[in-house]
Amino acid sequence: PLPTDLASLADHERHARAALDPAAWSYLCGAAGDGLTERNNRAAWESIALRPRVLAPLAGLNTRTTLLGRSMAWPLLVAPVAFQQLAHRDGELGIAMAAAAQEAGMVLSTQAGVAMEAVAEAVREDAGRGPLWFQLYWQADRGIVEGLVRRAEACGFEALVLTVDSPVRAGFRLPAGLATPNLPPSSGDADFDTLCATAPTWAELEWLCGRTRLPVVVKGVLHHADAREAVARGAAAVIVSNHGGRTLDGAVATATVLPGVVEAVGGRAPVLVDGGLRRGADILKALALGAQAVLVGRPAVWGLAHSGAIGVAHALRLLRDELQMAMALCGCADLARVRAEPPVFSPNQ
Ligand code: FNR
């Protein structure tokens, strides 16, 4: 049963930690290096101050938005997280169903523990759900990439998310016995030189964009010039992300670079952001800084770890309710108003 004292995501985190064995906790909730970037992600959202407007009409308050040409009830997707069955046997299917129940989107990892077809099937009938995207880690063998793309297209994924911030992987030690049914068994660990030699470049992004009818979203951008180039080479959206502080420790916080990326992309493509969003007010800040939508990684894992799918649904519901409350208290009846008059403090306004 769901714990009775879940008033914030911090409560979810505490219950998750108690439910998981230490090895699973350290993989699922850990960060690279000294955890600088992970802490800074959170601190950067916390340091942004909201500036409410008063006496604005709030009737009909809603969080609806559009993303890549499709409507969604609120602007959140669960970020791709590998090996979700480490947290709970409900795993990826649990996250997919909880996201659908809360009308959020979901991005399924290349390193999912279940076949992508099973996840797509589980939420196929759910008309109210948010977007279902497939995250792609580039593979040295283009045939494998092509195979993943064809399967994702065939079973109903709506976009491909190419993760570009981990050309080489930080050494997270994985508990034994984890399977990746979406990948052929041969694509295991490689040494550093091989990883560098086979890391994707702009040419691979262009190849991918030309090879699929799905929109390609580039995940893991921190520099405005990279965001601009990604869009110029065919990306349909970019995700400002430092992988939740799990790749380069010391990388800048996502909230810090978001405004510059939004400005550089200049409305040619939606900009999304993730990393350290833990409150509905954080989501409002991200939208006020120009993000079209946000993603959360660990918070979904926390809910999953202590209570399976129902825990994920609860965690997402908290964020959704907090976002609505923050909008009301800032005098924003909808997200158009958030964009037109961003309710964040800046000294020269
Ligand atoms: C991730 N992330 C990730 N990203 C990705 O593109 N493919 C993946 O397979 C994974 N796997 C993964 C596993 C775990 C356990 C975590 C915590 C994260 C990164 C993820 O998509 C996202 O960028 C961050 O988790 C966002 O930060 P927060 O919300 O966790 O702070």
Image (spheres, rainbow, N blue to C red):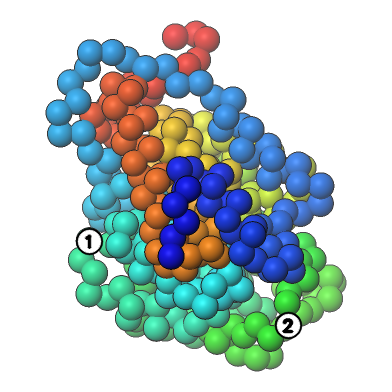
Is residue 208 visible in the rendered structure shown here? Answer: no
Please name the residue that numbered disc 2 is placed on.
176
- Say whether disc 1 or disc 2 marks the residue closer to the N-terminus: 1
- Examine the rendered structure and indicate whether residue 151 appears above or below residue 342: below
Q: Position of residue 189 (x, y in %)?
A: 76, 79
Q: Nearer the viewer's eye, disc 1 or disc 2?
A: 2
Q: As rendered, which of 292 and 80 lies closer to the eye? A: 80
Crowding around mark 2 (Cα neighbors within 10 Å: few <14, some 14 to 19, many 20+) is few
Where does the C terminus fall, quadrant-wise?
top left
Residue at 59% over, 59% down: 16
Direction from residue 278 to residue 40 in the image, left or right = right
- Examine the rendered structure and indicate whether residue 104 appears above or below residue 1: above
Give the amino acid at mark 2: Ala
Marking on residue 128: 1
Give the amino acid at mark 1: Gly
SS class, disc 2? loop
Marking on residue 330: none
Residue at 25% over, 33% down: 334
- Examine the rendered structure and indicate whether residue 64 appears above or below residue 167: above
In the image as oriented, which residue stretches furthest toward the left? 59
Q: Position of residue 219 (x, y in %)?
A: 54, 56
Q: Position of residue 156 (x, y in %)?
A: 32, 76
Residue at 79% over, 66% down: 171
